[in-house]
Amino acid sequence: METALSGHPESASPIPSRITNILGLAGTKAVLLTIAETVRASYWFLPAVMVVCSILLASLTQWLDARVDPGWLEGFEWLYSNQTVGARAVLSTIASSMITVAGVTFSMTIVSVSNASAQFGPRLVANFMRDRGNQITLGIFIATFTYCLMVLRGVRDGVADDSEVVAFIPHISVLVAVLLAFASISVLIYFIHHVPETINVGNIIAKIGRDLRRSVDELFDGNDEPTQTDLSGRQGRTEFETYEIAQSTTVASDRSGYVRALDLEEIFAIACKHDVKVRVEYVPGDFALVGEAIFYVLPGERASEDCVDALRACVSLSERPDRAQDVRFLVDQLVEIIARALSPGVNDPYTAINCLNLLMDSLALATRRSSPASVRMDSDGNARVVSNPYDFERLAKSIFRQSLQYVASDRNVTLHVMHMIATVGSRSNQPAHREALRKHADEIAAVASDAIGNRLQAAEIERAADLVGKILEGDADVETLREGEAWLGGSG
């Protein structure tokens, strides 16, 4: 009968497995993905590394000062500091200035983040924290401040009546401090230009669009021509149901959280090693409750403790959704901007159209690639991993269903969605793709007809939906449409 393993967090798994889950770590691939995403999204990591480098640089320059004769600097009076009081003044001025400027830049960043969060949604806060320009700017200022402090402590005054205590003026170190100050001034100028750029809605949307396209490119197979496989991803799960599910072993989550990363390659290797079949119940972005089944393992008698612990280690859980492997997270960001742009208080359809163009780009890319396999076979043809992957149909549903209530309220945006569906559908040679897009077009047209009170505009949308249907069914003259109404391609 069905066996539930690790259904309770206190008695479920060995200590090492619990520690890896608490830390948000999983299998090899999941560990790397989680660490890389955490480091990239942190606002402190790069500045901390730069501070450590500044300490090492201060030690190196002071070591050179102790071993290199400063006579070669005497010809450059603006570089040469012949008094300890002058060296201290320069270092103190740079240090105090840098910590002040760092506070100002940090305040500017907080204001930018707050403004973007209020205007475009709280999901975008992480984008500003991940911005390399902001991290490097803060790092340069803090590193310069730390460098000056480290060098300042090495400046010594000589004692007149003690021949063993001589003055030490770190000329090279002071020179490097001045160079760092000039670099900081340059970075400050860059930062003043960079902050308005980062809160520009066009740049924000473009950045999310690039990330979404990259995620779709990684999720879908790299083949240019999609293979004629099960596009819905549900066939494998149906095959699994033909077995006695009661004879399987349940691998349950030992804590609640969002699935941040899922190492399918490692799951496949574990299934082959233990000669079992694994059904995956979650995809990245899903929220799993403690005790909820993450995997079913068949036959249950082969699911040893080692097998269960290894499978659980292939899942990384987080307290919040993350973009590591979750395409929906990026889709949700664009949909949220669409919702805010089309709200009565903003009423900005052109920003919504911009978001739809980027969504169209990623959706069109998915039509040219193979959807993730729902069943993974070993070399002997045995099904080892069964899942319901995030395929083209689910991607289209995430885009159109979530934005339906917003886009259907605006005539211009609704017509652009029809253009979007027609463009993507005309590029796909998969009947399943076209059928899914046709359903979304009909649904959007029906909702828009009710939401838009103007009968002429509602009739225009219905005509557009009929034309989209003809394009997707292959009954329309595509070349004529390109030349006439610019439904496909550009408007030139």
Image (cartoon, helix red, strand yellow):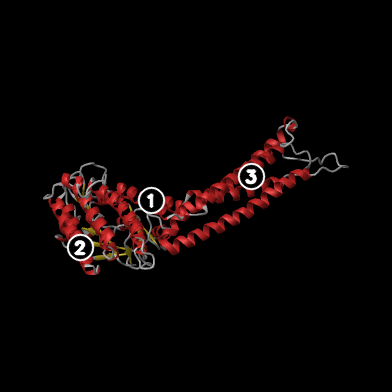
Q: Secondary structure at mark 1?
A: helix
Q: Position of residue 284 (x, y in %)?
A: 32, 57
Comes first in the chain, label 3 or label 1: 3
Q: What's under tag 3, amino acid-wise?
A: Ala
Residue situated in front as seen by the camera: 212 or 317: 212
Q: Secondary structure at mark 2?
A: helix
Quadrant occupied by the N terminus: bottom left
Residue at image coords 35%, 66% = 343
In this picture, residue 272 sits left or right of residue 79: left
**Circle 1 sits on which residue?**
206
Q: Which mark is residue 445?
A: 2
Comes first in the chain, label 3 or label 2: 3
Residue situated in front as seen by the camera: 348 or 249: 348
**Circle 3 sits on which residue?**
181
| Residue density around tag 3, few if under 14, some if 14–19, many if 20 or more, within 10 Å | many
Q: CA distance from mark 3 to mark 2?
A: 60 Å
Q: What's under tag 1, amino acid-wise?
A: Ala
Residue situated in front as seen by the camera: 478 or 277: 478
Q: What's under tag 2, amino acid-wise?
A: Ala
292 in relation to 168, above or below: below
In this picture, residue 151 sits left or right of residue 337: right
Residue at image coords 85%, 39% = 163
